[in-house]
Image (cartoon, rainbow, N blue to C red):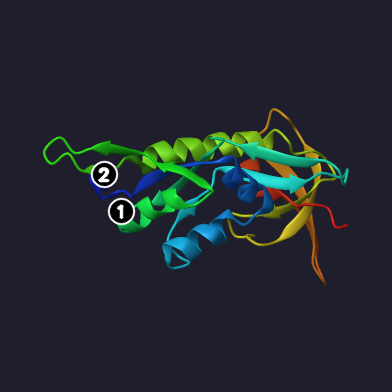
Amino acid sequence: MQRDERDAPTWVVLELTRAGERLIEEGRLDYVLRQHLQCPPEHPIFIPTVVYNSDDPNDRIVLSATEGYVFIASGLSERSLFQLEGLPFVKKVMTSRDPATGLRVCMVVSDRDLQQIRLQLSKLISSTLTPDMEVSIIHGHLTGMRGKIVSDDSESDSVDIYIELRSLRLIRRIPKSAVRPVSPKR
């Protein structure tokens, strides 16, 4: 049975200020938004940016599919979302006017549209993967494990990752979309 598209989640769009973008780069925006919204940790917030440090300590890699925007799953009160506009890191909540009442309402994007942004971000990330890069696996049955890329065919959608456990060493082919670079230890 096919799921009715109207049952799929929708996402409220926030436009950030430069201060908000700095919070993303510092890895703190998710936490700060949850504090101000007083929403549970399981409420979805999608920040379409990945930040990691390269081997050069002065070089930070910032990959963004939609620079300056963040998506919060619908279901929170519009009032709490509108209160974010008074904070220095949110420029505005994207809204429109209800034609019947004239009231301001949150504009939302569909989950299908957000999947396209996720795919775009995955493609950006996969373009930065190189042999000997340490990565973390974020999807699949090896979720949470870390390994090192041992080979990368730029034409392929997968990479070979060497994973070392206490009593086991293995190489697994993992989709590029399922890995994220890990910042080198300093």
Disc number at residue 52? none
Could you tell me residue 64's position as x and y percent?
Answer: 60, 37
The C terminus appears in which quarter of the rendering? bottom right
For the point 50% across and 57% down, the residue is 33
Ranked by sequence position, the earlier of labels 1 and 2 is 1
Q: Is residue 83 left or right of residue 151?
A: left
- Label 2 element class: strand
Q: Nearer the viewer, residue 93 or 147?
A: 93
Task: Decide if residue 157 is in sight here.
Answer: no
In the image, is 117 to the left or to the right of 142?
A: left
- Quadrant in the rendering for residue 123: top right
Depth check, front residue: 152 or 168: 152
Residue 25, relative to residue 167: is it above or below? Answer: above
Does the residue at mark 1 contact the one at mark 2 (Cβ under 8 Å)? yes
Going by the numbered disc 2, the residue's amino acid type is Val
Kindly identify which residue carries mark 1. 78
Residue depicted at x 45% and y 40%: 115
> Relative to residue 41, is residue 129 drawn left or right?
right
Q: Residue 39, located in which quarter of the rendered image?
A: bottom left
Percent from the top left, x then y, of residue 111? 37, 43
Measure how far apart labels 1 and 2 are at the Cα level.
8 Å
For the point 42% across and 48% down, the residue is 85
> Residue at (24%, 45%) from the top-left corner?
6
- Confirm whether residue 120 shows in the render: yes
| Circle on res. 105 | 2
Please state the horizontal and vertical placement of residue 117, each as a whole percent of the image: 49, 37
